[in-house]
Image (cartoon, rainbow, N blue to C red):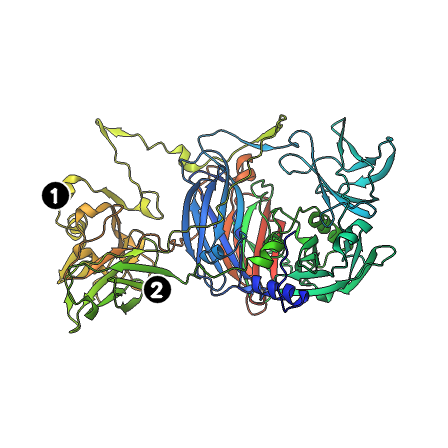
Amino acid sequence: MPSFSQANKTSKELISNNINNYFLMDRENIHVQFNKDVFFTSEDIWFKGYVYNRKTKTPFKVTTNVFLSLIGENGTKIKDQLVYAQNGSFSGNFEADSSLKSGTYYIQVYTNWMNNFAESEAFIQKIQILNKKDSEFAGVDTPAGSPVVAFHPEGGQLVQGTSSVLGIRIQDCNNQVTSVTEAGIFNSKGEQVKKVFIDKSGYGKFDLPWGEEQYILRYNFDGKGFEKPLPKAQTRGFALDVNNYSLPGKTLVNLSSNKETMRTLNGEDIYLVVHQDDNSAIFDVKLDPETLKQQLVFSNAELSEGVNTLRLVDGKLNQLAERLIFQPIEQNTEAALKVTKHAKDSVTISGAPGNNMNLSISVLPGESIASRESSGIFSSFLLHPYVNEKVWHNNYVFSNPTKAEHYELDLFLLNQKSGKYTWKNIMTNAPVDTYKFDLGVQIKGSLNPTLKNFEDHRIQLFSVTSDIDEATKANKNREFYFDNLILADSSWINLGVYDKRNMLVKTSVFPEVINGKGKYVHAFQPKLVSCNELVEKKTFALPAFAEEFVQLDEVELQGRKVEQFEHQNDSGNRNLTAFKVSERDESMYRDVLQFIEANSTFTVENSQGRVSIFSRQSSTISSARVTPIVYLNNIQLFDLSILSVMRMYEVAEVYINAQAIVASVRNNIGIVKIYTKAGYVTAAKDGVVPFQVVNGFAIQKPFENSFYYSTSDRGFKNFGLVHWIPTVLTNDEGKIEFQAPKLGQEDLRVRIEGFAADGTLISEERNITVN
């Protein structure tokens, strides 16, 4: 076995130092709540994310850049986006593109900082997407074929001459629970020597005095008998039996071995290492020389809340055994949701989750089957960071559980092959901060090689819409950088180069966003499971979406096909007159301002690049001139100067409504929306170079539900969405109040998740009667 010992330090010091070094760097953990986990193409996938600091067990408030990737069931990345996190949380949406095939997909959520670690700290969510062209959704209704049995010795090994504990997992090939509730252990004579009970999650355990006997596991399933040989005991090793749930406040560790093991160790020191990240305790192990057994008892105060790893280590720092246990958290957070007010079409729901809570809320029909894969925030922050197998667990096992509930979670941990953090890595491979902790968008650019005395020039970046005005200088390679910028994707900024006399120079710059495209070293690769036996499936009724009943895609008038618009379904655009820019428009109009004035009742004024657009009507008694709201690629423009240099060949579509009354403090009248062609950058004017940000932060749009043809049919009850609220903050009394539409439902299923400033977690789901 490899040795990790070093001179001049005791083994305990080396163990403690290596653990501290390995977990020295802060680690982010992420949990994401989705509005549901079964979606249809063209539906929005809404989400709210929470970032957690493992060291402080509080919101990770400095995180800003979070990447989300949509991944197919074969591991291919389909799309990704950069989202902006603030004070430990973020929110947004994905659209399930209409080209996606029906099937299983995954959403991976990570940060650039996570690339520094040997283990993946990313959050993974499994979802189902159904293409609307498909007529049915098939879900697994019964177990997939015969059960699959796996054995996991406590500590990692069965040892001859000891009473070792063996964990059992009986599930189907999709890791779903079967109907097996008990099994028998038989010796070579066919005699039953043990009965094993299998819990509702498919786990069990038993202990036996192990020798050279070959035992067999037998159980019945679906009227048939099955059997599987148990693994044989090894001639050397240590047997563990750990229990931190039977005696209040105490952890019991029973250790045993055999003479062959002790002979091999030849008097080497043995330690029991208990740690969660860098919080560790080290105990001396001294087996009784006659029985070769020892019982260690220590206070649960030595444990950290959540998963703790127990490792048996020798004096040369080799791991001999490993076991994961869970220390429950002590909190009693409950939202206590109830209906407090009824209206004709909505209900007001109130609750009291606690002080300083940041929450998100999903509301589904009471009979929904569209939220079955979601893992709660307790699992994401307390369990999943330490195990390789990501599974869903009821929240009751985490906070103040009963002994039976604690035992349920302990069985799961016993049946893990190993923890996520390997001892070899901890001893030899401490992380190095090769990848930086991103704080905003970084823009890199270069100056034109023909610019003389470039070192005497400064580069100015400014944007009225993003409230940015910064300056920098180029390095010796003519490169310049702007760091820590909060810039939305497709937004516009301006770059100018000024000489030492503060005069604007007409020259070229070549900017780009260099950290907006996520790349994760732990690329997610789904485990493809193929069950050999026939899987019985049940089909479910699907919701009907209102747009499916509007057949406009292939309308032709007098032999001329109606134009197809890329942005017509964007929020609010159906109430605007749409223009698809043609080659004729490009030749007829000099720039986009001339096009707007020619195709609307707006008046355009352009005085040396200072642009104003006015409505020809007044909304005030004083007859002050009023202006429309103008958007460029769905970003509202407050400074219209960029339009003065925008040529028509750069524009793809324009949407106009000169009479639209807009809710604003400025009494705006009218809306103009301009969408540019992909890849176009507006030409420089007087030395100022407009630059459209690519791979900036995803634009957060307000929640807008899909349009359902019916909310009373079985399809909507199965897979519809009633409401989604990404952010709810508790008031000074720790209470919340929100409204949800009834949509004809008798019951609503409300799921609320989030955390408080002090790290208190909440995850609650309940059905509420509304009629």
Q: Is residue 727 visible?
A: yes
Q: CA distance from mark 2 to mark 1?
A: 40 Å
Q: Secondary structure at mark 1?
A: helix
Check the image and name the residue furthest to the bottom: 501
The amino acid marked with disc number 2 is Asp
Query: In the image, residue 558 lies at what x, y percent?
Result: 21, 27
Toward which corner of the image does residue 8 lie, by quadrant? bottom right
The answer to whether residue 104 is above or below residue 704 is above
* Residue 323 seen from this side: no
Residue under label 2, please give it. 483
In this rendering, is residue 188 above or below 646?
A: above
Q: Which residue is mark 1?
A: 587
Q: Element at badge 2?
A: strand
| 94 left or right of 222 in image | left
Above or below — where is 484 with respect to 345?
below
Q: Is residue 354 left or right of residue 654?
A: right
